[in-house]
Image (tube, rainbow, N blue to C red):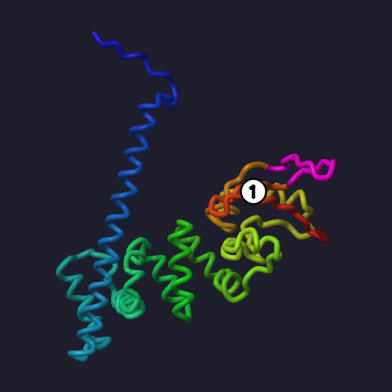
Amino acid sequence: MTDDKPMKSGVPEETGFDEVARLIQSARERALQAVNTELIDLYWKIGGILDRRIAEDGWGKGTVVSLSEYIQSRQPGIRGFSPQNLWRMLQFFQTWRNHEKLSTLLRQLPWSAHLHILVKTRRPEEREFYLKMAIQQHWSVREVARQMDNALFERVVLNPPKLSTALRELHSEAETFFRDAYIIEFLELPDGFRERDLHQGLLRNLQRFLCEIGRDFCFIGSEVPLQVGGRDFAVDMLFFHRELNCLIAIELKIGEF
Protein backbone atom coordinates (compact mmCIF):
# COMPACT_ATOMS: atom_id res chain seq x y z
CA MET A 1 0.00 0.00 0.00
CA THR A 2 1.23 3.49 -0.80
CA ASP A 3 0.04 6.81 0.43
CA ASP A 4 0.61 8.64 -2.86
CA LYS A 5 -2.02 11.16 -3.79
CA PRO A 6 -3.58 10.78 -7.23
CA MET A 7 -2.03 12.93 -9.95
CA LYS A 8 -4.10 15.76 -11.28
CA SER A 9 -4.45 16.18 -15.00
CA GLY A 10 -2.08 18.65 -16.64
CA VAL A 11 1.18 19.93 -15.17
CA PRO A 12 1.63 19.22 -11.43
CA GLU A 13 1.75 22.28 -9.25
CA GLU A 14 3.78 20.73 -6.42
CA THR A 15 6.67 22.99 -5.45
CA GLY A 16 8.92 19.95 -5.13
CA PHE A 17 8.41 19.10 -8.79
CA ASP A 18 9.26 22.66 -9.81
CA GLU A 19 12.42 22.54 -7.69
CA VAL A 20 13.61 19.39 -9.46
CA ALA A 21 12.83 20.91 -12.86
CA ARG A 22 14.88 24.00 -11.99
CA LEU A 23 17.82 21.82 -10.91
CA ILE A 24 17.72 19.95 -14.21
CA GLN A 25 17.60 23.16 -16.22
CA SER A 26 20.44 24.68 -14.22
CA ALA A 27 22.58 21.57 -14.71
CA ARG A 28 21.91 21.58 -18.45
CA GLU A 29 22.93 25.23 -18.72
CA ARG A 30 26.17 24.56 -16.82
CA ALA A 31 26.90 21.54 -19.02
CA LEU A 32 26.38 23.56 -22.20
CA GLN A 33 28.61 26.32 -20.88
CA ALA A 34 31.30 23.78 -19.98
CA VAL A 35 31.15 22.31 -23.50
CA ASN A 36 31.38 25.78 -25.01
CA THR A 37 34.34 26.68 -22.80
CA GLU A 38 36.21 23.57 -23.93
CA LEU A 39 35.38 24.22 -27.58
CA ILE A 40 36.55 27.84 -27.51
CA ASP A 41 39.69 26.77 -25.65
CA LEU A 42 40.34 24.13 -28.34
CA TYR A 43 39.92 26.66 -31.15
CA TRP A 44 42.23 29.07 -29.31
CA LYS A 45 44.95 26.41 -29.05
CA ILE A 46 44.59 25.42 -32.70
CA GLY A 47 44.81 29.08 -33.69
CA GLY A 48 48.01 29.36 -31.64
CA ILE A 49 49.53 26.31 -33.36
CA LEU A 50 48.69 27.70 -36.78
CA ASP A 51 50.19 31.06 -35.88
CA ARG A 52 53.43 29.42 -34.73
CA ARG A 53 53.67 27.02 -37.69
CA ILE A 54 53.08 29.80 -40.21
CA ALA A 55 55.82 31.89 -38.61
CA GLU A 56 58.34 29.08 -38.06
CA ASP A 57 57.62 26.53 -40.80
CA GLY A 58 56.06 28.64 -43.52
CA TRP A 59 52.63 26.98 -43.45
CA GLY A 60 50.26 28.46 -46.04
CA LYS A 61 46.81 27.94 -47.50
CA GLY A 62 47.73 24.61 -49.04
CA THR A 63 48.99 23.24 -45.74
CA VAL A 64 45.84 24.34 -43.92
CA VAL A 65 43.71 22.60 -46.56
CA SER A 66 45.77 19.45 -46.07
CA LEU A 67 45.34 19.76 -42.30
CA SER A 68 41.58 19.99 -42.72
CA GLU A 69 41.56 16.89 -44.91
CA TYR A 70 43.79 15.04 -42.43
CA ILE A 71 41.41 15.84 -39.55
CA GLN A 72 38.47 14.56 -41.61
CA SER A 73 40.33 11.34 -42.45
CA ARG A 74 41.16 10.67 -38.81
CA GLN A 75 37.67 11.56 -37.54
CA PRO A 76 35.13 11.08 -40.36
CA GLY A 77 32.04 13.24 -40.08
CA ILE A 78 33.53 15.71 -37.64
CA ARG A 79 32.35 19.26 -38.25
CA GLY A 80 33.90 22.67 -37.62
CA PHE A 81 37.36 22.05 -39.08
CA SER A 82 37.00 23.23 -42.66
CA PRO A 83 39.90 25.27 -44.07
CA GLN A 84 37.84 28.43 -43.68
CA ASN A 85 37.08 27.73 -40.04
CA LEU A 86 40.72 26.89 -39.33
CA TRP A 87 41.68 30.30 -40.71
CA ARG A 88 39.05 31.83 -38.41
CA MET A 89 40.70 30.10 -35.46
CA LEU A 90 43.98 31.72 -36.48
CA GLN A 91 42.27 35.10 -36.77
CA PHE A 92 40.62 34.55 -33.38
CA PHE A 93 43.98 33.85 -31.74
CA GLN A 94 45.78 36.73 -33.43
CA THR A 95 42.97 39.17 -32.58
CA TRP A 96 42.88 38.49 -28.85
CA ARG A 97 46.32 37.15 -27.91
CA ASN A 98 47.45 40.49 -26.47
CA HIS A 99 44.29 40.88 -24.36
CA GLU A 100 44.93 38.57 -21.42
CA LYS A 101 42.36 40.36 -19.25
CA LEU A 102 39.63 39.26 -21.65
CA SER A 103 40.61 35.58 -21.78
CA THR A 104 37.84 34.52 -19.37
CA LEU A 105 35.23 36.50 -21.27
CA LEU A 106 36.23 34.94 -24.58
CA ARG A 107 35.22 31.51 -23.34
CA GLN A 108 31.74 32.66 -22.36
CA LEU A 109 30.56 33.37 -25.91
CA PRO A 110 29.67 30.69 -28.48
CA TRP A 111 31.82 30.39 -31.58
CA SER A 112 29.08 31.72 -33.87
CA ALA A 113 28.96 34.95 -31.87
CA HIS A 114 32.74 35.26 -32.10
CA LEU A 115 32.55 34.88 -35.87
CA HIS A 116 30.11 37.78 -36.13
CA ILE A 117 32.41 39.96 -34.04
CA LEU A 118 35.54 38.97 -35.97
CA VAL A 119 34.01 39.50 -39.40
CA LYS A 120 31.95 42.64 -38.83
CA THR A 121 34.20 44.84 -36.66
CA ARG A 122 37.00 47.10 -37.83
CA ARG A 123 38.73 48.37 -34.70
CA PRO A 124 39.87 46.78 -31.39
CA GLU A 125 37.62 48.94 -29.18
CA GLU A 126 34.61 47.96 -31.28
CA ARG A 127 35.37 44.25 -30.90
CA GLU A 128 35.83 44.59 -27.15
CA PHE A 129 32.60 46.59 -26.87
CA TYR A 130 30.50 43.88 -28.53
CA LEU A 131 32.25 41.11 -26.61
CA LYS A 132 31.47 42.73 -23.25
CA MET A 133 27.95 43.78 -24.20
CA ALA A 134 27.04 40.30 -25.46
CA ILE A 135 28.11 38.75 -22.16
CA GLN A 136 26.70 41.47 -19.92
CA GLN A 137 23.31 41.48 -21.65
CA HIS A 138 23.23 37.69 -22.24
CA TRP A 139 22.62 38.15 -25.96
CA SER A 140 21.82 35.22 -28.18
CA VAL A 141 23.88 34.80 -31.36
CA ARG A 142 20.94 36.23 -33.29
CA GLU A 143 20.85 39.29 -31.05
CA VAL A 144 24.62 39.81 -31.42
CA ALA A 145 24.17 39.91 -35.20
CA ARG A 146 21.16 42.23 -34.90
CA GLN A 147 22.91 44.75 -32.66
CA MET A 148 25.95 44.81 -34.93
CA ASP A 149 23.81 45.23 -38.05
CA ASN A 150 22.10 48.15 -36.31
CA ALA A 151 25.46 49.79 -35.45
CA LEU A 152 25.08 49.78 -31.67
CA PHE A 153 28.75 50.73 -31.20
CA GLU A 154 28.33 53.86 -33.30
CA ARG A 155 25.11 54.80 -31.50
CA VAL A 156 26.50 54.30 -28.00
CA VAL A 157 30.23 55.04 -28.13
CA LEU A 158 30.75 57.32 -31.12
CA ASN A 159 27.52 59.25 -30.53
CA PRO A 160 26.89 59.30 -26.76
CA PRO A 161 23.36 60.22 -25.60
CA LYS A 162 22.42 63.81 -24.82
CA LEU A 163 21.45 63.81 -21.15
CA SER A 164 20.27 66.68 -18.98
CA THR A 165 22.64 68.22 -16.45
CA ALA A 166 20.31 67.21 -13.63
CA LEU A 167 20.37 63.57 -14.69
CA ARG A 168 24.16 63.56 -14.98
CA GLU A 169 24.44 65.02 -11.48
CA LEU A 170 22.05 62.48 -9.99
CA HIS A 171 23.46 59.48 -11.87
CA SER A 172 26.93 60.08 -13.28
CA GLU A 173 26.94 56.62 -14.91
CA ALA A 174 23.59 57.14 -16.68
CA GLU A 175 25.33 57.75 -20.01
CA THR A 176 26.30 54.09 -20.19
CA PHE A 177 22.68 52.92 -19.88
CA PHE A 178 20.82 55.21 -22.28
CA ARG A 179 20.97 55.88 -26.01
CA ASP A 180 19.57 58.61 -28.20
CA ALA A 181 18.29 56.08 -30.74
CA TYR A 182 16.71 52.66 -30.25
CA ILE A 183 16.00 50.23 -33.09
CA ILE A 184 12.56 48.60 -32.90
CA GLU A 185 12.18 47.27 -36.43
CA PHE A 186 10.82 44.04 -34.97
CA LEU A 187 7.46 45.81 -34.38
CA GLU A 188 6.84 45.84 -38.16
CA LEU A 189 4.46 48.77 -37.85
CA PRO A 190 2.55 49.87 -40.98
CA ASP A 191 2.94 53.28 -42.58
CA GLY A 192 0.94 55.98 -40.82
CA PHE A 193 0.82 54.15 -37.49
CA ARG A 194 -0.47 55.96 -34.42
CA GLU A 195 0.96 56.28 -30.92
CA ARG A 196 -1.44 53.62 -29.70
CA ASP A 197 -0.12 51.21 -32.36
CA LEU A 198 3.43 51.88 -31.15
CA HIS A 199 2.38 51.40 -27.53
CA GLN A 200 0.58 48.11 -28.17
CA GLY A 201 3.40 46.87 -30.37
CA LEU A 202 5.96 47.42 -27.61
CA LEU A 203 3.78 45.62 -25.08
CA ARG A 204 3.31 42.64 -27.42
CA ASN A 205 7.06 42.48 -28.02
CA LEU A 206 8.14 43.37 -24.49
CA GLN A 207 10.87 40.74 -24.27
CA ARG A 208 12.55 41.99 -27.45
CA PHE A 209 12.10 45.61 -26.35
CA LEU A 210 13.80 44.84 -23.02
CA CYS A 211 16.67 43.26 -24.94
CA GLU A 212 17.00 46.46 -26.99
CA ILE A 213 16.93 48.95 -24.10
CA GLY A 214 19.07 46.85 -21.75
CA ARG A 215 18.95 43.95 -19.33
CA ASP A 216 18.82 46.15 -16.21
CA PHE A 217 15.41 47.55 -17.14
CA CYS A 218 12.55 45.79 -15.32
CA PHE A 219 9.02 46.38 -16.60
CA ILE A 220 6.55 47.57 -13.95
CA GLY A 221 3.43 48.48 -15.89
CA SER A 222 1.64 50.32 -18.66
CA GLU A 223 -0.46 53.48 -18.30
CA VAL A 224 0.57 53.75 -14.66
CA PRO A 225 -1.32 56.58 -12.90
CA LEU A 226 0.83 59.50 -11.74
CA GLN A 227 -0.15 62.76 -10.06
CA VAL A 228 1.99 65.87 -10.55
CA GLY A 229 1.01 69.30 -9.27
CA GLY A 230 -2.51 68.15 -8.52
CA ARG A 231 -2.99 66.85 -12.09
CA ASP A 232 -3.50 63.22 -13.06
CA PHE A 233 -1.37 61.60 -15.76
CA ALA A 234 -0.84 58.07 -17.09
CA VAL A 235 2.75 57.03 -17.76
CA ASP A 236 2.87 55.04 -21.01
CA MET A 237 5.48 52.59 -19.71
CA LEU A 238 7.16 52.46 -16.32
CA PHE A 239 10.39 50.59 -15.61
CA PHE A 240 12.76 50.09 -12.71
CA HIS A 241 16.48 50.19 -13.44
CA ARG A 242 18.44 47.83 -11.21
CA GLU A 243 21.87 49.41 -11.63
CA LEU A 244 20.71 53.02 -11.26
CA ASN A 245 18.22 51.97 -8.54
CA CYS A 246 15.52 54.31 -9.81
CA LEU A 247 12.27 54.40 -11.76
CA ILE A 248 12.35 55.14 -15.50
CA ALA A 249 9.21 56.55 -17.10
CA ILE A 250 8.82 56.31 -20.88
CA GLU A 251 6.39 58.61 -22.64
CA LEU A 252 5.68 57.62 -26.23
CA LYS A 253 5.22 60.38 -28.80
CA ILE A 254 5.11 60.30 -32.59
CA GLY A 255 4.86 64.07 -32.96
CA GLU A 256 6.19 66.79 -30.68
CA PHE A 257 6.70 65.93 -27.03
Tell me which segment is drawn in magenta: 222-235
> Quick one: quadrant of the C terminus?
bottom right
Query: How far across and how far down the image is residue 51, in percent?
Result: 25, 83
Q: Residue at point 20% right, 70% down?
A: 72
Q: Residue 33 lies in magenta, yes or no?
A: no
Regarding residue 84, the answer to whether it shows in the image is: no
* Vertical side of 246 occupied by 142: above or below: below
Query: How far across and how far down the image is residue 41, in percent?
Result: 26, 66
Q: What residue type is labelled 1?
A: Leu
Query: How far across and how far down the image is residue 68, in percent?
Result: 23, 76
Q: How many marks?
A: 1
Q: Residue at point 35% right, 75% down?
A: 99
> Of 100 and 167, which appears nearest the observer?
167
Q: Residue at point 23% right, 74% down?
A: 46
Q: In this view, does 201 lie to the left or right of 150?
A: right
Q: Residue furthest left?
A: 74
Q: Is residue 234 left or right of residue 248?
A: right
Q: Is mark 1 on a helix, strand or loop?
A: strand
Residue picked out by circle 1: 247
Q: Residue furthest front?
A: 169
> Of 145 and 73, which appears nearest the observer?
145
* Vertical side of 245 occupied by 143: above or below: below
Q: Residue at point 36% right, 32% down?
A: 19
Query: How far across and how far down the image is residue 147, in percent?
Result: 54, 66
